[in-house]
Image (cartoon, rainbow, N blue to C red):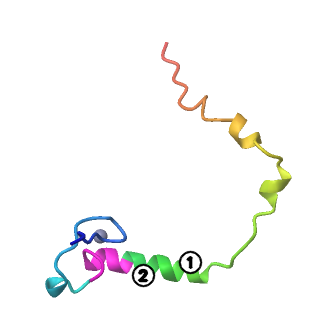
Amino acid sequence: MAELVCPYCNGALPPRATNTAFPFCSQRCRSIDLGAWLAEDYRVPVREDETERDGPGEEQLGGPQQGGRTEVN
Ligand SMILES: [Zn+2]
């Protein structure tokens, strides 16, 4: 029998009989996931054409090399 996990937090899922938030582990995860769904629904699907305009691989070159530069003198 496969162990059920919460689709939101991947936590262990309480037995369905005692879990009012099924198939989530808790009401919290359930409402969060529901909110995400709604938010997704409201979002207008936009194609990001601008990423193509930048040219390929340019973002990768400017990697996170100079992240936290700490000069302690
Ligand atoms: Zn959860």
Percent coordinates x, y for residue 57 in the rendering: 75, 42
The amino acid type of the residue labelled 2 equals Leu
Q: Looking at the image, is 28 positioned above or below residue 16? A: above
Give the residue at the far left of this rendering.
18
- Specify the label residue 34 is tagged with: 2
Which quarter of the figure is the N terminus placed in?
A: bottom left
Residue 17 lies in the magenta-colored region: no
Q: Looking at the image, is 59 positioned above or below residue 65? A: below
**Closer to the camera in the image, 24 or 72:** 24
Percent coordinates x, y for residue 36 in the rendering: 47, 76
Q: Report the magenta residues as a range.
A: 22-31
Residue 28 lies in the magenta-colored region: yes
Q: Looking at the image, is 2 positioned above or below residue 64? A: below
- Give left or right: position of 69 versus 20: right
Crowding at dot 2, Cα within 10 Å, few <14 / some 14-19 / many 20+, comes out as few
The amino acid type of the residue labelled 1 equals Glu
- Give left or right: position of 28 versus 40: left
Percent coordinates x, y for residue 48 in the rendering: 76, 64
Residue at horizontal 63 percent and vertical 78 percent from the top: 43
Q: Is mark 2 within 8 Å of ligand 1?
A: no
- Give left or right: position of 34 versus 53: left
Q: Quadrant of residue 3?
A: bottom left
In which quadrant of this rendering is ligand 1 seen?
A: bottom left
Residue at horizontal 42 percent and vertical 81 percent from the top: 34
Q: Is mark 1 within 8 Å of ligand 1?
A: no
**Closer to the camera in the image, 73 or 57:** 57
**What secondary structure is found at the residue carrying circle 2?**
helix
Residue on which the image places disc 1 = 40
**What secondary structure is found at the residue carrying circle 1?**
helix
Ranked by sequence position, the earlier of labels 1 and 2 is: 2
Residue at horizontal 14 percent and vertical 84 percent from the top: 18
